[in-house]
Amino acid sequence: MIWANLLHLSTNMWMDYERPRGAEDRSYYDPSLRFDKGLWDDVTSRMAEAGLNMVVIDLGDGVKYDSHPEIAVKGAWSPNRLRREVDRLRKLGLEPIPKLNFSACHDAWLGPYSRMVSTEAYYAVCKDLIHEVAALFDRPRFFHLGMDEETPQHQRRHHYMVVRQGDLWWHDFLFLAKQVKAAGVRPWIWSDYVWHHADEFFARMPKYVLQSNWYYDRSFSKKIRYVEAYLDLEKHGYDQIPTGSNLAGYDWASPDNFERTVPWCTRHIPPKRLFGFLQTTWRPTIPRHRQSHLDAIERVARAKAKLERRR
């Protein structure tokens, strides 16, 4: 079973403009890499010690790609440095999985191309980046494409809003998924498109795409649409990696969510389609968020131990 944690090299995904003075730092674009290698090493070592076996790396503009170095922020890693880190993680016993979020809500990392969505230039850049990253990770098992929250509501504070709908959303998503598949890798996405487009989703979403529905609160009532989505995905035969979080300070999130997600999903999703679980902190990999990262790992370890005792 997969026990994964999402870590960020880049966090340029929530906003398309730089942080105003006094605003919380995680939600805004930064032209420099916000990343601490010492904390990264500590967190990944702790993950291995705690029994986690996968790290999903949100790369974004944190790499100076050979194909498109123009999108890199100041301090971005070279491709060779990323290769060395991928090798180090494997030696720790962690399976490294790349993530590039191509949702028009979370693509500030694409730089000028984030304002060229659905153009020929955009498709060419996306294709180049997917194939380069797949090669840098030596053709990994999965490639996370993001694709969440592409709605007007989620972009209400952006300076530049883009929302693809209907056939255009599907055209672009399937283009990205097919590029991943052509690179010999399985596409993986956030599943929240299903929340409001269930009939369309189940008619058009390929079964080869790995699904991560996400839900961060305490209650697991089947009447909650975000919870019901786990059941709908199972009913339609999709492979899943349910996603929880230790987010705190929001009325829609609970720090102990991951420990609740694991038992509920293992009761409702059969092992053949339940690939494992993904934990998220949604915090930059910088010292001020050290405790959030360590707490996330501890919660995975507790949930894993409880599940193993029940079995």
Image: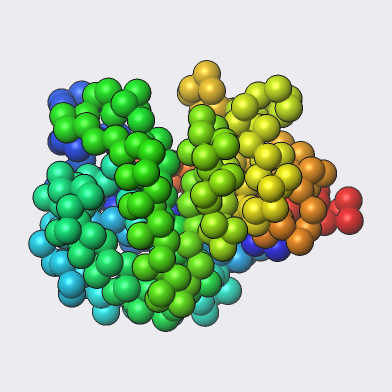
Q: Quadrant of the C terminus?
A: bottom right
Residue at 37% x, 44% y is 167
From the top left corner, tell me how far across and down residue 20 is, in percent. Answer: 16, 27
Answer with left or right where residue 297 lies relative to residue 70.
Answer: right
Answer with left or right where residue 168 lies relative to residue 47.
Answer: left
Residue at 21% x, 47% y is 117
Query: Residue 130's image quarter?
Result: bottom left
Residue occupying the far top of the picture = 251
Is residue 8 among what the camera can see?
Answer: no
How has the structure been colored for display?
rainbow
From the top left corner, tell me how far across and down residue 158 is, in percent. Answer: 21, 29
Residue at 24% x, 36% y is 162
Q: Quadrant of the N terminus?
A: bottom right
Tally the marks. Answer: 0
Placement of 96 over or under 119, stated as above or below: below
From the top left corner, tell me how far across and down residue 154 is, in percent. Answer: 35, 28
Answer with left or right where residue 176 lies relative to residue 127.
Answer: right
Is residue 231 among what the camera can see?
Answer: yes
Residue at 27% x, 23% y is 156
Q: Nearer the viewer, residue 166 or 49?
A: 166
From the top left corner, tell me how far across and down residue 106 is, in percent. Answer: 31, 42
